[in-house]
Image: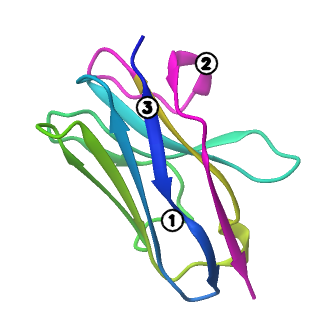
Amino acid sequence: QVQLVESGGGSAQAGGSLRLRCVASEYINCMTWFRQAPGKGREAVASNNGGGTVTYFSDSVKGRFTIARDNAEKTLWLSMESLRPEDTGTYYCAGKSGGHCPRNSDAYNHWGRGAQVTVSS
């Protein structure tokens, strides 16, 4: 079982920035950031398949969030800028083998415990 541990996040004012980090216990091809707002389901935010393909699933984060990865360090980052109150939620790092990174959370079998991000207006 691959262990995923998120860190970072916290609180920010609207327009501010935060950064999340996810460290995996071993290499896994597809790593994706999901987020879950209070009372809502998990939404795929962005993924990196380890081979250089980056996908931003949510139009609302394009141009504001950046996903990056260090395969040697088995680390995935999510840099979040120009934060909005609607970015508030719990952010999860998820992983699956194989190079295809779908937006469906059911496809992932490795999950971190989540990191809280709160953006105030």
Residue that numbered label 3 is attached to:
4
User: Residue 33 placed where, x, y %?
Assistant: 48, 44
Residue 10 belongs to the span the image colors magenta: no
Can residue 92 be seen here? The reply is yes
Label 3: few (<14), some or many (≥20) within 10 Å? Answer: many
Q: Residue at x 65, y 66 (%)?
A: 87
Which is closer to the viewer, label 3 or label 2?
3
Q: Which residue is drawn at 61% across and 18% down?
A: 106
In-front residue for pair 83/12: 12
Residue that numbered label 2 is attached to:
106
> In the displayed structure, does residue 78 sit left or right of residue 108?
left
Q: Residue at x 47, y 53 (%)?
A: 7
* Three-letter residue code for mark 3: Leu
Disc 3 to disc 2: CB gap under 8 Å: no
* Three-letter residue code for mark 1: Val
Alpha carbon separation for disc pair 1 and 2: 22 Å
Residue 112 belongs to the span the image colors magenta: yes
Q: Which residue is drawn at 23% across and 47% down?
A: 69
The numbered disc on residue 61 is 1
Q: Is residue 33 above or below residue 63?
A: above
Can residue 108 be seen here? The reply is no
